[in-house]
Image (cartoon, helix red, strand yellow):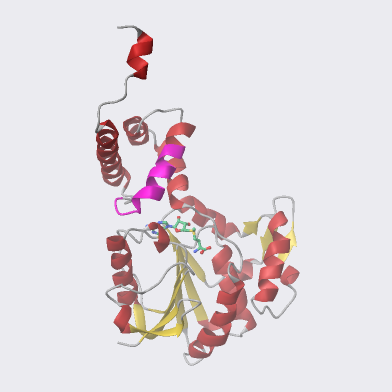
Amino acid sequence: MNRAEVVSEPPPAGDDQEDEDLERIEIRLLLEGIYSRYGFDFRDYAPASLKRRLWRRIDAEGLTSVSGLQEKVLHDSACMERLLLDLSINVTAMFRDPSFYAALREKVVPLLRTYPFTRIWNAGCSTGEEVYSIAMLLREEGLYDRTRIYATDINDSVIERARHGVFPLDKMREYTQNYINAGGKRAFSEYYVAGYDGAQFQHSLVENVVFAQHNLASDGSFNEFNTIVCRNVMIYFDRPLQDRVHELFYESLAMFGVLALGHKESLKFSPYERCYEVLDGQEKLYRKVR
Ligand SMILES: C[S@@+](CC[C@H](N)C(=O)[O-])C[C@H]1O[C@@H](n2cnc3c(N)ncnc32)[C@H](O)[C@@H]1O
């Protein structure tokens, strides 16, 4: 038989299915390996987006299979760092979804005013744009000095960037517009100084912020909060992991505390749905009532 005949022969029925099954096994082994070796738990992330991101890293490393990536990641922690950046999807923005911040100001701030001191957890804070936005809003409402914000993320390197508070200069026009649409009360430019590396935001905005690594997939509760802001994070989790995180948030919220989710996220169908009342359905603001 010549080569042309071999190539043109259709694959036996079921080959594709077998490949997919094998790949699923390889991915499971890779994720188990990462968990045992580094403690990062991606085992319950939504499979389709996980697979896409793994293959992006496989290509970038010049590898050809999931098993190849497993071998490299287990022996080379720098490769794990790179994969972590791929998997943790750090896209964020200041005053992202301005209508959310407007609702926070209008509906959550009055509730926070009723406490002498409040704790806010910003879970999945990425490079910090969200926590700086929350801090500005609280300062403008006269609440910042009696608030402590805990800003956490699975990824150490984004937390480090959040601590520095330097954001790209070419984003300032977009962020200024977001800030205005969110009901900002000052000139946005008051909050930063333009420098060579980017816009350096006032350090005083994070004076009351505690930055720490925390993995929503495996770590427990660490305080009691009046508000938890966790936006655009659970969208990457499968149902059981979302339920785990809802349990964690429920346990971590004080009674009448507020949970804020991303526009594409919801409490619907979670086992905790009936424990909250809807403060703003559009902006995914919920209040714990039982
Ligand atoms: C798309 S960003 C969202 C950032 C910000 N909350 C926002 O809405 O702009 C998702 C963030 O969730 C973090 N993340 C992913 N899995 C996590 C986990 N298991 N525990 C904590 N943070 C996680 C990622 O590192 C990333 O910084």
Task: From this view, report whether residue 4 is shown above or below residue 265.
Answer: above
Name which residue lies at 54% across and 56% down: 91
Task: From this view, report whether residue 129 is shown above or below residue 137.
Answer: above
> Viewed as shown, does residue 68 lie left or right of 144?
left
Q: Residue furthest top?
A: 2
Q: Is residue 273 magenta?
A: no
Where the C terminus falls, by quadrant?
bottom left
Q: Position of residue 232 (x, y in %)?
A: 47, 63
Where the N terminus falls, by quadrant?
top left
Residue 104 is drawn in which quadrant? bottom right
Pick whichever, 185 or 174, lies toward us.
Answer: 174
Name which residue lies at 38% across and 60% down: 214
Q: Residue furthest bottom?
A: 114
Q: Over which residues does the magenta segment extend?
A: 43-56
Q: Is residue 174 among what the camera can see? A: yes
Q: Position of residue 209 (x, y in %)?
A: 51, 69
Pick whichever, 14 or 76, lies toward us.
Answer: 14
